[in-house]
């Protein structure tokens, strides 16, 4: 897109959108003569104006990741500055938009759409669309089966669901984190904080009005948690990884753990003196490669993620989310530490049988003798017997000596109990 035509500064690029596969690009240019939106393909040398979008300022684009091809964008959704959601498709062979349809328009509270995401799932009676769209103060959600036009038309007769979070933010953004080609959680950079949650497609429970709640574990991360006591400091951009938020605050990126809500790292950039004064403009990500980028007036900085999940078992353990902690353990020693915390918590609560079951799963951090003495010292014969039986369950057939020893001891404890009953 050549901006050198005409007087300097007469035209400026407003937004650029590239599909996850890198084949399709949409860009909006604002000039003194109006607004034009361009489309270009990775194999083209020149872009083409999308004439049906003349005058519309496109702020956000949602790509149909499941169905897009190199030859066609398939249906995409665009969010505009005047509060409209439009559907469009471009086939490369036609070199122009096939159609532009108005899907939805904000009338009660006209605001610009600033972020947009779409997910699809194949169901027995067609394709189900899930759409999230944000303005500076609201997050809207739409879902339905059929074409996009039919899904949005159905909202004439039913309530549009939205979450309202008032507050000012320089740039309201919406992001999905993609894992194995499926969105698994979302984050909205709002004026009140980062509103985020897990996305569960295809396993939802329908509500009475026909909608499906595909968002779970919703939470709001307040900016005060990482503003270092300075009021009013809000991120100007956001990127989302599997376990972390990357927040652009001033000229640095703060990496915040999504689960613990703690700052784990701060990143600084090697900028030129001129660029420092202008600041970092924004963050973006390449979902397919798992890479993140920050950019200023002159440079692009790559942010690499290196094994971000290595300590997540400990994060979940500190929060007493034991199932999640075990799911993120990398080795037997880490699992032992999770079982130990559970065992000691049950022991302290005098739930000795439950404690015995957890102690029986431990192989390294405590010896068999140490655990046995715990129960012997408080005369908890039933718990000791439970520990021995559960330990037997966890032994392999090759550990014959231990099996013989534990079986003999367990038998003696049973005989003692029988003798006690007989007396």
Image: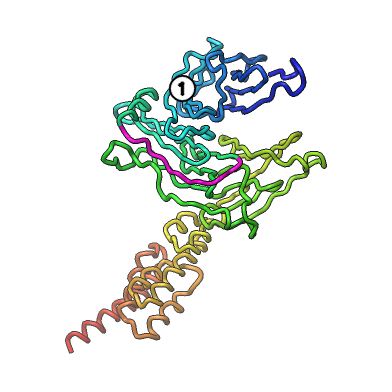
Total label count? 1
Task: Check the image and name the residue furthest to the front.
Answer: 108
Q: Is the magenta stretch mostly helix, strand or loop?
A: loop
In the image, the segment drawn in magenta is 158-170
- Colouring style: rainbow
**222 vs 231, nearest the viewer:** 231
Residue 78 x %, y %: 50, 26
Examine the rendered structure and indicate whether residue 7 appears above or below residue 62: above
| Pointer 1 local density, CA inside 10 Å: few below 14, some 14–19, many at least 20 | many
Quick check: is 223 in the magenta stretch? Answer: no
> Which residue corresponds to the image point at 39% horizontal and 68% vertical from the top-left?
358
> Which residue corresponds to the image point at 61% horizontal and 56% vertical from the top-left?
226
Task: Check the image and name the residue furthest to the left.
Answer: 422
Q: Name the residue under label 1.
A: 87
Residue 84 x %, y %: 48, 27
Q: Can residue 84 be seen in this view?
A: yes
**112 vs 194, nearest the viewer:** 112
Examine the rendered structure and indicate whether residue 137 appears above or below residue 350: above
Examine the rendered structure and indicate whether residue 157 appears above or below residue 202: above
Which quadrant holds residue 7?
A: top right
Examine the rendered structure and indicate whether residue 421 appears above or below residue 233: below
**310 vs 333, nearest the viewer:** 310
**Secondary element at image label 1:** strand
Task: Check the image and name the residue furthest to the bottom.
Answer: 423
Query: Quarter of the image containing the C terminus?
Result: bottom left
Which quadrant holds residue 156?
A: top left
Position of 53 with respect to 274 (left or right) is left
Query: Quarter of the image containing the N terminus?
Result: top right
> Which residue corresponds to the image point at 43% horizontal and 30% vertical from the top-left?
107
Residue 310 x %, y %: 57, 54
Q: Is residue 41 visible?
A: no
């Amino acid at each position: 897109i050549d901006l050198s035509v005409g007087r300097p500064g007469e035209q400026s690029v407003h937004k650029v959108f590239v599909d996850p596969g890198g084949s399709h690009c949409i860009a909006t240019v604002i000039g003194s003569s109006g607004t034009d939106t361009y489309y270009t393909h990775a194999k083209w040398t020149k872009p083409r104006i999308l004439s049906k979008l003349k005058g519309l300022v496109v702020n956000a684009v949602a790509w149909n990741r499941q169905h897009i091809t190199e030859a066609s964008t398939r249906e995409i959704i665009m969010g505009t500055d005047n509060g409209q959601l439009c559907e469009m498709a471009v086939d490369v062979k036609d070199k122009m938009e096939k159609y532009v349809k108005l899907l939805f328009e904000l009338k009660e509270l006209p605001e610009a759409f600033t972020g947009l995401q779409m997910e699809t799932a194949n169901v027995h009676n067609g394709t189900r669309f899930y759409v999230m769209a944000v303005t500076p103060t609201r997050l809207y959600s739409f879902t339905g089966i059929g074409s996009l036009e039919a899904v949005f038309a159905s909202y004439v007769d039913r309530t549009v669901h939205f979450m309202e979070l008032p507050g000012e933010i320089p740039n309201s953004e919406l992001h999905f984190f993609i894992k194995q080609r499926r969105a698994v959680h979302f984050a909205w950079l709002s004026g009140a904080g980062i509103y985020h949650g897990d996305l569960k497609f295809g396993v939802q429970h329908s509500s009475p009005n026909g909608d499906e709640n595909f968002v779970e574990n919703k939470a709001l991360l307040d900016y005060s948690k990482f503003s270092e006591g300075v009021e009013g400091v809000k991120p100007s951009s956001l990127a989302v990884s599997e376990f972390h938020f990357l927040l652009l605050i001033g000229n640095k990126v703060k990496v915040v753990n999504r689960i613990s809500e703690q700052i784990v790292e701060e990143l600084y950039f090697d900028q030129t003196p001129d660029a420092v004064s202008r600041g970092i403009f924004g963050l973006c990500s390449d979902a397919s490669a798992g890479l993140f980028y920050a950019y200023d007036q002159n440079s692009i900085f790559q942010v690499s993620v290196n094994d971000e999940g290595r300590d997540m078992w400990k994060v979940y353990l500190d929060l007493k989310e034991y199932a999640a902690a075990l799911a993120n353990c990398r080795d037997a020693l880490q699992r032992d530490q999770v079982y130990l915390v559970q065992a000691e918590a049950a022991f302290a609560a005098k739930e000795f049988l439950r404690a015995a079951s957890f102690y029986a799963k431990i192989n390294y951090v405590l010896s068999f003798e140490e655990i046995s003495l715990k129960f012997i010292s408080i005369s908890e014969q039933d718990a000791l017997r439970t520990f021995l039986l559960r330990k037997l369950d966890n032994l392999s057939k090759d550990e014959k000596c231990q099996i013989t020893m534990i079986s003999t001891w367990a038998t003696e404890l049973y005989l003692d109990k029988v003798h006690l009953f007989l007396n």
